[in-house]
Image: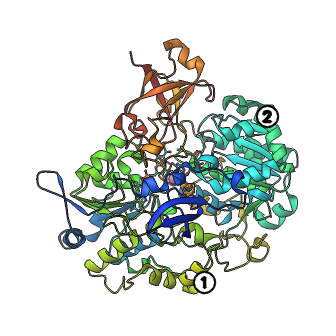
Amino acid sequence: MKQDTVCRMCSSCCPVEVEVVAGKLVSAQRKSFLNKDKRSPCLKLQAAADIVYSEKRLTTPLIRKKDGAFRQASWDEALDLVAARFQHYKKQIHPEAVGWLRGMAADWGSPWDYANRLMNCYGSPNTIGNGSICFVAREMAHTYTYGTMAFAEAAKARCILVWGKHDADTALGVADAINHAVSNGAKLIVVDPIQTPLAQKADIWLQIKPGHDGLLAMTMINEIISQDLQDHAFIEGFTTGFDQLQEVASRYAIDTIAPDIWLDPHQVREAARLYASTKPACLIDGNGLDMQLDIFQSTRAVACLRGLTGNIDRPGGDVLPQPIPLHPFQARDRLPVGVPPITAAYPLFNTFSESWGNQVQSCVADAILDQKPYGLKMLVVQAGNPVVTMADSSRAHRAMEELEFLVVIDLFMTRTAELADVILPAAGCFEKTQLNRAATRNNPIILQNQVIEPVGQSWPDWQIVFELGRRIGLEQDFPWQSVEAAIDEQLAPAGVTVEQLRQNPEGVRVEELRHEKYRQDGFATPSGKFEFFSRRLQESGFAGVPYEDGFQENVISFGEQQEEFPLIGISGRRDIRFTNSQYRTIPALLKGEEGCVVDIHPLDAAPQQIGDGDPLQITTPKGTITMPARVSSLVHPGSIRIAWGWGDYNPVYNLNTLTDDDVRNPITGTPGQRTFMCRVEKVR
Ligand SMILES: Nc1nc2c(c(=O)[nH]1)N[C@H]1C(S)=C(S)[C@@H](COP(=O)(O)OP(=O)(O)OC[C@H]3O[C@@H](n4cnc5c(=O)[nH]c(N)nc54)[C@H](O)[C@@H]3O)O[C@H]1N2
Ligand SMILES: Nc1nc2c(c(=O)[nH]1)N[C@H]1C(S)=C(S)[C@@H](COP(=O)(O)OP(=O)(O)OC[C@H]3O[C@@H](n4cnc5c(=O)[nH]c(N)nc54)[C@H](O)[C@@H]3O)O[C@H]1N2
Ligand code: SF4
Ligand SMILES: [Mo]
């Protein structure tokens, strides 16, 4: 039997059709507006059955015994134990000694709301997401520019500027749209320090020096204005601060800056002109900007391009989302007033949006290890593997060990789960019904539908949170016995029900897609305009116009120690077979560690006579890892690309052993996990 749902094995949230035979998932196919032969293939989805029925799945709750080993437990026993600890800290210390750390895997939509609700009603402000290193930090920079984060309508664009994103590995729906537009003649500009498959297809590839995107954006703004290619009508009618932007950008001269950031001035000019003069053009920015110390200003500058060229909210440009009205589920009003979250040092990031809340995950380690701003004693980690995905893994590991009580909710045994006191087995995406953020932000709403029973005794995340809530005395706050009842209540303001969504697997539209909505509604900024200049930022002591205070010197971690660590390390490719630290336990995907390599340029390989497959030690002030070399001119001389996500499989390959968590972006608390200075030695 074929059934419709949404895959959530990575953050793409692809609509899929699943073949279920005798209650078992057999195969799954991604849907797309493209014909089957034109769709970007997803190797994870092809291995869906291997993942779902992997013998490595956690199938019962586990409780740590006195001798350190785990024993199987019933849900009643495990949940009662966790609930008792919640009550203990509330009585003995205070509720804010308990934290809840969310990874990205269970989605940012409902699952995030449910965990927040539990914690707010319990009385702790410390529900912390990992958005400081993922796209939420970037979303904030966009929001401070034009009130939200637009999405590119790439399929209809005539020019596509892709900035630090590689959708063929990470977001297949977008990859399909880019491929479609390019095969219809759209121009493609790619900003990436690596000669990726997309860069190879581009009309212009800008091989930017890692971490220096802000400088490139400012020179492009300068060029567009000098050539008078900006959209005058849009700027006059709908923006603030154009004159200030023009003045600041005029300080960023292409001829002097481009060579410093590994670019040819002529090429930068060409890219700026092509992007600004081809209509409609869209801009797709990505995680290449995230995890950078300079994340906020660089993204602000990139976001300004959307307004400067007037492409914002035009067909084939960058479309403003039409979020559907939802019943707020986070119950923020239940939080006692006056208790600051552990992320209090980042007030702008904590409050930039209604739904995000606290996202500086590094603060979790600060609170546990340094009691800053106060101590955390207990932590629930849901859908995350912080021991290998947070910056400075040694520190993250110490923090998880230091906790008095750690609960992990996951599908698999991970390096983080190994340290837990209680492990609660979660059901995977095909085993549960869920309302994902992608479905509520832009219409149409597409439901993630349960198509098979949970494996073993695993439970869906919603059930774990609701049942735990009831056991800590919050029966009235978690009255729902099914997820359908909860989603119906959430969707009530939109007038949509689960039943209706199930009958319309292609999605239900709440409102027709509209463009240029700002003409009627304005932008959701304090001025109601597209803000090249932000008074909010200026009043908080930050640059009102991007880079008006200059470009900071050390945008790369350990930049002040370049003599000892002369190479730029780039946290590298996201392989389509994996999602962050996940799925290396699946033999069909692991393929003998294929792709676990460091790319090093022939010029950098020559002095030590490094050849393909030679084990390389990579060292930073934080630690050393070892990985096989691949000599490759896909990288620029002076930089290496290190494969991402292998740390759970084998700590020897754990990239975050190398990264720093001491220096962070002042607005979003983002550490430099993407780019850092390092050195390599061939292991003899
Ligand atoms: N150096 C470096 N560091 C990085 C990155 C990088 O590129 N380089 N990437 C960063 C980014 S962008 C992110 S988002 C983070 C990701 O950080 P994490 O969210 O910690 O990463 P994952 O490895 O995806 O871990 C997700 C865990 O959730 C589990 N899981 C999957 N589905 C579910 C579910 O439905 N319910 C529950 N309860 N568990 C589930 C998986 O088994 C897995 O153990 O890592 C960041 N860290
Ligand atoms: N298969 C797979 N899919 C995934 C994930 C996964 O791990 N595997 N992770 C999911 C998650 S959590 C996220 S956040 C998204 C991220 O997905 P994307 O936004 O596509 O991010 P990445 O693939 O990490 O990096 C994109 C590009 O940025 C480039 N880059 C590196 N450094 C720089 C730089 O300094 N400047 C610029 N301009 N570019 C740079 C890289 O070379 C890469 O080609 O993918 C999601 N989807
Ligand atoms: S890209 Fe693949 S793994 Fe990710 S959501 Fe889509 S089908 Fe699933
Ligand atoms: Mo992410």
Residue at 35% over, 47% down = 387
Q: Is residue 330 visible?
A: yes
The quadrant the N terminus occupies is bottom right
* Mark 1 secondary-structure assignment: helix
In the figure, residue 273 lies in which quadrant? top right
Q: Position of residue 40 (x, y in %)?
A: 65, 50
* Mark 2 secondary-structure assignment: helix
Tell me which amino acid carries mark 2.
Answer: Gln
Q: Give the residue number, with chain letter if any, for mark 1.
A: 494
Q: Which mark is residue 267?
A: 2
Q: Position of residue 683 (x, y in %)?
A: 39, 19
Tell me which amino acid carries mark 1.
Answer: Ala
- Name the mark nearer the viewer: 2 or 1: 1
- Give me the C-alpha separation between circle 2 and circle 1: 48 Å
Task: Sort mark 2 into few (<14), some (14-19) or many (20+) by Cα contacts within 10 Å.
Answer: some
Query: In the image as oriented, which residue stretches furthest toward the front?
Result: 22
